[in-house]
Image (cartoon, coloured by chain):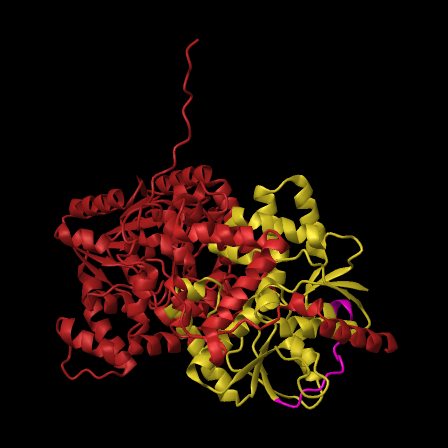
Chain colours: A yellow, B red
Amino acid sequence: MRVALFATCLGDTLFPGAVKATALLLARLGHDVVFPPGQTCCGQMHVNTGYQPDALPLVRNYADTFGDPSIDAVVVPSGSCAGSVRHQHEIVAGRYGDAALRGKVDTVKAKTYELSEFLVDVLGVTDVGARYPHRVTYHPTCHSLRMLRVGDKPLQLLRNVRDIDLVELPEADSCCGFGGTFAIKNAETSTAMLSDKLRNIAATGAEYCTAGDSSCLMHIGGGMSRLKTGGRTVHLAEILASVDAPVVTA
Amino acid sequence: MSITALGTPTVPPRGSGNLRGVEKFPDAAHHELTDSQLRRNIGKATHTIRAKRLRVTGEVPDWEALRDAGAAVKKDVLARLPELLEQLEAAVAERGGIVHWAADADEANALVAQLVRDTGSDEIVKVKSMATQEIGLNEYLEAQGIVAHETDLAELIVQLGHDRPSHILVPAIHRNRSEIREIFLREMPGVDPDLDDNPAHLAEAARKFLRHKFMTVPVAVSGANFGIAETGTLAVVESEGNGRMCLTLPQTLITVMGIEKLLPTYRDLEVFLQLLPRSSTGERMNPYTSMWTGVTPGDGPQAFHLILLDNGRTAALADSVGREALHCIRCSACLNVCPVYERTGGHAYGSTYPGPIGAVLTPQLAGMNEPGDPNATLPFASSLCGACFDACPVKIDIPSLLVELRHQKVEQAGLTVEAAAMKAASLAMSSSRRWTAAQKAGGIGGRIVAGKKGAISALPGPLGGWTAARDIPAPPKQTFRQWWDSDEGRAAMAAARQEGGER
């Protein structure tokens, strides 16, 4: 299968480790992995902050970049960005785009998948042959949980990782407080949400907190770093691409 | 040739009353977040109700179908609102009730005051009601020399504490029992000075105080959970029975009902009497459901007035996207699951309607477009986590409505510093050539700021909100796309492909 990576603006720039892991994992599973260089950003920040007309060029760029019919699937190591492509692009295109764009958006959205969805639903794989000898807790990010409904797919994948000590996170489905520009506009409320998330992570005794979104991990990791909790974050893709010790690091 | 102006549709008037705070949400939240007692009370209460709700909604096999039915009925009501309201008016009048129409809070308040004065009473007992909180009825009546006694225990606690409700269903959710004991000892006439904080004893003290009012006050004011267009029947759903007292004992009953509270037929109650208690209190059935139709000679109030309240609802209805918020049946499930509400409590929203539904309903009812309006900050008071949408018994897509209101606010605000930054970001991200240039500049800058520590702990301007409590990692030396195009990347991918080919 010809699989195009959508690195996301954040993954490309700040968290390339998660994207490298996704690329290596999919190639090792026997797929033809490509990286269309025209890609930039899904436009979610613009839509969620109220700037829909400014999201239009980004929606168009995504549709143009991944519209190539030789691409069978677009895989995104982010539930939030995949959610934006699947649920928001049609709103922007419907309001500000032309019929041609609306058609392209529909086509591209139908072949865009978050990583765990792609592995479990499309490829039918739950054991990717990874080994990760660490104590790990999984935070289900809001958009993967409630926008994409990935359910326990990431956990199915994690349970099959060799030597992993997977521990349950209390109040796992509570938001970490990121929420894009919410973390800046309502910084104190966001921080109050984060502090509960950090407390619950610490209570598990896990060495790593993992999730399917670099943005939420940036928030959680940013709090760990500031508070010197000693905790660490790792993207789900990095665990799944691990063969011995973590082979891929940012 | 002369031009004939046919007239353009005008925007219906916005609502007034307790639908606007004095501070912007982040400023109001700042005060609430530091109140450790409030944080503890609300955290405990919301978690308890959450668990109960999940238990009783999980046991209903057709819960999702019920939600769909509830949403469909409400959508139908909004589509046929004028026709259904007239049907309700005729049905109520036919059964001996008198229907009044109030365009806004001022009109509704003046109507109630006049109707009370007409009875010769200067006292009323009240059933817990969101509509009368919304219009600020108690404060208005007080200024008119009429004393309103709240009879719902939690509303009584709020009223005696000279406080504001902070939750739709549990208005005193921000108070714990020792605080309630203090309020009763300080404010309740004739209270036992040895009152302790045992919940049963606190309830008993309120019961004694209220019984006397029920037996002596001749006028009651209520809201309505539902108004049935077909029959003219009004319904109030409650837990304590105080509402039943108010609805049956006084001579005169005045009901203030928002015009969106309609249901077309009596049969529709079947859906909503399942959805509401399970979503709000987490009970299979609420203890008291009172229904009344006009006036019954010799039984119950002999004069019944129904005030139909607009107060911004027609303005909300005019918005094809935002009108979905008018489906709300005030169950408060969205408040109880909201991570923002859980931390800030209800007062931070500045409105009778707090939490996720308040953040979409308040700006729509009362507007948000005046310069510096605190209501304009409400649609942004959410991380868009989506827990509210999952909990809503009538499937209001609150996250999408929040995003839509943000869009409306930004469109209306015009050119701001933020808008300029967003436009610049859009331009930078609209082509990969510009984007890689921006990545390069940002990467170098970021690494310089981060220095040896490898993390950024202070950012300027609004971004400082992030670094007040969180670091940002330094941008790595290589972006993903640089790695992809590097010898190292090519070699790693070639090895992975080879492994894949062997599988």
Identify the image quadrant of the N terminus of chain A. bottom right
Q: Nearer the viewer, residue B242 or B466?
A: B466
Task: Locate residue A203, reporting x and y percent.
Answer: 49, 88
Does residue A126 show up magenta in the picture?
yes
Give residue B338's quadrant in the image.
Answer: bottom left
Left or right side of B317 for A79: right
Give residue B488's quadrant in the image.
Answer: bottom right
| Residue at image coords 41%, 44% | B414
B42 above or below B255? below
Left or right side of A66 for A216: left
Q: Nearer the viewer, residue A66 or B291?
A: A66
Left or right side of B199 for A197: right
| Residue at image coords 52%, 88% | A204
> Magenta stretch?
A120-134
Task: Locate residue A135, reporting x and y percent.
Answer: 60, 89
B452 above or below B257? below
Identify the image quadrant of the C terminus of chain A. bottom right
Task: Locate residue A76, reporting x and y percent.
Answer: 66, 65
B144 above or below A161? above
Residue farthest to the right, as pictured: B502
* Main secondary-structure element of the magenta-colored stretch: loop
| Residue at image coords 14%, 74% | B186
The number of numbered discs placed on residues in the rendered structure image is 0
Task: Locate residue B91, reporting x and y percent.
Answer: 40, 41
| Residue at image coords 44%, 43% | B317
